[in-house]
Image (tube, coloured by chain):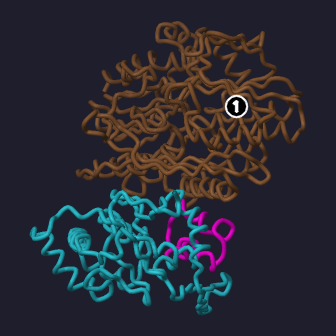
Chain colours: A cyan, B brown
Amino acid sequence: MKITRNLCRGLVIAIAVICSPPAATAEPIRVVLEFVPDIDNGRRSFEICARCHLPEAWGNDDGTYPQLAGQHVNVLMKQLLDIRSGRRDNPTMQPFVQQRTIGGYQNLADVVAYISTLPMNPAHARGPWPPDSPEYLEGKRLYSQHCAGCHGAMGEGNNELSYPRLQGQHYEYMARQARLARDRLRQVAPSMTSLIVSLSVDDFDQALNYVSYLPLPAGDLAPDADWRNPDFQ
Amino acid sequence: MKKSDNFSRRRFIQAGGAVLAGGAVGATPATATAAESGDSAQPAAPALHKLLRKAAIPAARGARAVVVGGGWSGLTMAKYLKRFNPGFDVILIDRQSAFVSFPVSNAWLADQVTLEFLSHSFFEAANNHGYLFMQATVLGFDRETRRVYTERGYVEYDYLVLAPGIEYDYSRIGVDDTVAQNLLFHRYPGGFVTSSELLTIKQKIHRFNGGTFVLTVPNGDYRCSAAPYERACMVAAVFKRRRIRAKVLLLDMNSEITIKKAGFTRAFEQLYGDFIQYLPSSEISSVDIEGRNIATEFDEYPFDDAIIYPPVRASSLLEEAGIDNPLDPQKAANTDPFRYHLVDDERVYVTGDSRAQPFSKGGHTAHSEAQYVAEVIAAHARGFEVRWRSPQTMCFSAVDIEPLRAMSIITYYKFDKHSGLFAFDRTHLMDKWDTQGGQASLAWAEGMYRDMFYL
C-alpha cells in the first residue's frame, strides 16, 4: 500500500519572546518569524531526534514518549522552542534542541515539517474505558463541554492557533501531561490552567480516555503497526 | 526498645565486620566472606559505639526515604521521589564526596571533554531538588528496626532504596586471593566503579611508552556492554595521536563483540588497523600481576600495561544482608521483577546495576528505571499502584576523535508471559558513526547531568 504524505507547503512560524533580564518592568517584545521548510533537510536533522524518538516518531504506549507523527507544525515548533528556552521543563531533551546541536530556527522549521509528514501510528494506546462504558460516555460529555472548543470535535487541534492535535496521541502520555500540569510541573496555556482547577483528575482521565478512541483520517495512518520509516532503512 | 538495640548491635557486628574488611558500599573487589570477617571485626570494636548512635541529621518531616548509592540510579531516585511525593523526607547516602560520570569518561580519556564536564556536586543535586545528601559509607541495615547503619551513625527509614551498584568479581578470572584481588585492582583497575580508577587509566594511556597494552572485556551481565570496545577505540586514538608504536590487545571473554558489532568492527579496521588487535573467546584463567602476564586456557599474553575489567557482581551489601538470590551467580537481590521491592518486604527496593532483572547495566537504563520506581514508591505511600513500564537503554559509543564521532543504540524491554522472562523489545541502532552522533552523545550526557543535578 502506498503512503500518501501530506506534503507540508505552508509556513512554519517561530515566535520568539525576547526578555532582557535587567529590565524587569519592560514589556516582552514579540518577534514573529516565518520560515519556508525544507523537508529534505528536515529528514537529515531528524536523525538526531530519531536516536530517542525512533524513526517513526510514534511514541510509546506507556506514555514516556509522545506520538509526534502527524502533529501540527506550529505545535511542534512551540514545544521545541519552549524546551529550548527552558519554559517547558525537559532537562534531558533540552541540550538536543540547542543551536549547537540541532541548529537554528530554519533547521527547527525543517525538522518539524518533516515530522508532520510522517504517517501516524495506527495502533496508538487507548484509555482503560472502552466505548459505551459509563466512564467513556462521561468523558465524551466532558470533552464536548470543556475541550472541543479549542482542540476540535475530533481532537484535530488547530495549527494556526498552536492547539495540539490530540487524536492519535497515546492515552498515558496525555494523562501524564495533565498530571504534571496539575502539579505545576508543566506550564500550560492559561485556559488549560483554569480547566485543571475546575476539573478533577478523574474528569481529565475520562475526557482523555474519550479522545484516545476518536478515529483518525485513514490517509494519515501508516498501513500497519509494523510499518518502518523507509528514510531510515 | 532494649531488645531491638541488642538485636541490631549483633546484626551490625556481623554485617559491619565484612565491610570493614573489604571496603564500602560497592566495595571493590568483592568483600571477604562472612567467615573471615568475624575475626577482622575485632580491632574495630572500640569505635562501634560511635556507629550505633543516631546520625546528626534533621528529624524526619514526613515519611523518610533513604537512598543508598549516589550513582545514576540513586541520584535520579532521590530527585523523583521528592518530585512525585513532596511529602517525602529524602536522604541520599554515598561514600564519595563528589560525582564523576562514568558514561562519556572514555571520551575524556582521549581529551574530548573536560573533567569538569563529568564532575558534579552531590550537595548541588540535593539543594536543587530538596533532599539531603549524607557522605557516609553504608555498613548494613536492619529491616526490623528500619535502620541504615553508616560510620556516621544510623538513619531510620520508612522506605529504603538500595542502588549500591556493582563490584568486580576477580574470582571469575582466576584470582581468588583477596590480597591479590586488591593488588590487581590498584595496579590494573577496570575503570567502572571508582573515580580513582579513571584517573589512573588516563595517566597510563598518556604516559605509555609503547609495547602491548591489554584491555579486557568481561563476560556475563557486565556494566556498560559497549564501553570496553569504545575504550579500545579511545586508547588507540590516543596512541595514534601520540605516534607511539603500541598495540592495543583487546581480550574479549565473549565469543564476539557483544553490541554494535558492525560499527565497532568497521572502526577497528578502518581507523585502528595498525593499533587494535581483537581476540574473541579469550576466557581469562589467571593473571600474573608481578610478571605482567594474562593466561587463557590456550594462550599466554605478556603485557606492558593493562586495564583489566573482570566480570561483575551485585554489591556485597545485598549478600551480607541476606537478601540476595542464592541462585544468581551475580548475587543480585531477590526482588519483585515489576515493583522492585524485596519479595518479602515492600519497604525495601533494589534498583540500578545491582537489580535482579537482566536489563542492560548502565547509566541510562538506571536513570529511566529510577523514574518509574520513584513513582511506584510514591504511589505505594499513597495506597495505589502504577502500571509497569519498561526502562530504556540509550547507549552512545565514541569511536573517533577530533572531531568526536559516535554511534548510538536505544532499546526497550518487554516481559514475555510465555517464557516468564524479559526480552528486548523495539531496538533502534544507528551504527554509522559520525560527528552528529558525537554531538548527540554530549547533548545526551549534558541532559542527564541537568536532570540529576540542576533542574
**Residue that numbered label 1 is attached to:** B197
Is residue A91 within the magenta segment? yes
User: In the rendering, at what x and y percent does residue A35 appear?
Assistant: 60, 86
On screen, residue B437 above or below B321: below
User: In the rendering, at what x and y percent does residue A109 appear?
Assistant: 57, 79
Quarter of the image that includes the N terminus of chain B: top left
Is residue A179 within the magenta segment? no
Amino acid type of the residue that numbered disc 1 sits on in the rendered structure:
Glu
Give whichever of B8, B330 is nearer the camera. B330
On screen, residue B370 above or below B83: above
User: In the rendering, at what x and y percent does residue A37 appear?
Assistant: 58, 82
Give whichever of B60, B298 is nearer the camera. B298
Query: Taking B121 as reference, is B360 left or right?
Result: left
Residue A188 lies in quadrant: bottom left
Quarter of the image that includes the C terminus of chain B: bottom right
Q: Which residues are magenta?
A: A79-108
User: In the rendering, at what x and y percent does residue A214 appear?
Assistant: 24, 75
Residue at 39% in and 28% down: B333
